[in-house]
Image (tube, rainbow, N blue to C red):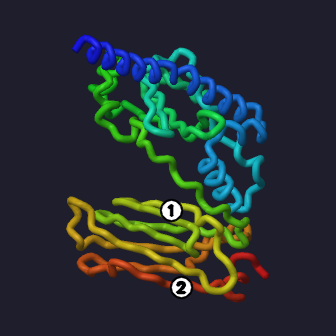
Amino acid sequence: MNRLIFALLLIFATLAGGQENLRPTLETTYSAWREAMIRRDPAAWQRVTAEHRRVEVRNRIVSEKQPFPATVFNLPAPPPSLQGLTFLEAKKNGATAKASYFGKIDFGVGGEPTDNLLVLSFVQSSGGWLYDRADFVNLAALPAVRKELAKGNLKYLKETPEAQPSGEVPPTPISAQPAKYVAKVYVFCPGREIQVQINKISRHRFANAKEAEVVIGGAVDGPNEVQFTVKKLEGGTGKEVMTIRVYLMSELAGEKPVKAFEYQIAAGEKPVPVATKVFNVDAATVAKIAGR
């Protein structure tokens, strides 16, 4: 019995030590990523950024016909430093990890920062831990959570799936070709979840949203395929209005985007649950968006 107790204590101590030792490793990775962004260093950014995130960022940039990798570093504010923040926890689950911090997160845009939450995500590769993304949680509307975290109570982190490593590394998307025509998909779907796929490359999910996202790979000459699924969300009536559109962004100064595709239902109408549609980019469309 004593041997069993000793063995269990050893296992628990090893697991706890593994999580504790995770912190300096993850912070070193984040600092290297932050330094690469501030110095606008493409080689360093590539070394410390997770593969799926690198491809995702590149796809978005070339789909907007922006220069890569220069546009990677065009951020509205520099990544925040961890200095002065309170470390909350670092957790590992398989090849994923998260590190959470609380305090006055400073994005260098002026004003007086307030106490909020920063969650950093990482994935593990053969070369070690790589940076994935940062999630900033504004706690202005969650004063009770702000007080809990200030006291070291991590209940909110444990109850929030987005603050815990999932154990699933996101798949690396297909590397898209630079867009010939910049396009955006717009969805208005109160009470519903809509998933859209364009040209079998650009995948989008909208839930109870009114949003627009860049179409990865853009639109192409000739037929463009739009596939979508519609599902009612809990709390929805199934009778709400709904809109799915694809816009082609004009290359002419001062001109509005051209609506290339639309699926829309009025209040009370029933949407199709699954559909595949096509819109064409023909000579007349090109003349409208590019003047040629």
Q: Which mark is residue 13?
A: none
The percent position of residue 182, horizontal first and vertical second, equals: 66, 68
Q: Specify whether 206 is left or right of 57.
A: left
Q: Which residue is mark 1?
A: 212
Tell me if mark 2 has few (under 14), some (14-19) or many (20+) residues whose alpha carbon lies within 10 angstroms of its own: some
Q: Secondary structure at mark 1?
A: strand
Amino acid type indicated by mark 2: Val
Q: Is residue 123 above or below residue 116?
A: below
Identify the amino acid type marked 1: Ala
Task: Please report the residue visible at 36 percent of the width from the left and 31 percent of the height from the top.
Answer: 140
| Quarter occupied by residue 180 | bottom right
Viewport quadrant of the N terminus = top left
Q: CA distance from mark 1 to mark 2?
A: 19 Å
Q: Position of residue 124 (x, y in %)?
A: 56, 38
Check disc 2 and report the residue beneath it. 278
* Circle nearer the N terminus (1, 2): 1
- The picture places residue 172, in percent across and down from the top left corner, at 59, 55
Which of these two is toward me, 3 or 92?
3
* 141, 89: nearer the viewer: 89
Work out whether residue 109 can be spotted. Answer: no
Q: Residue at x 58, y 75 (%)?
A: 199
Residue 6 placed where, x, y %? 31, 13
Q: Are marks 1 and 2 in contact (CB under 8 Å)?
A: no
Residue at 54% in and 54% down: 171
Q: Nearer the viewer, mark 1 or mark 2?
A: 2
Residue closest to the eye, 264 or 10: 10
Q: Secondary structure at mark 2?
A: strand
Which residue is at the front of the view, 84 or 266? 84
Quadrant holding the C terminus: bottom right
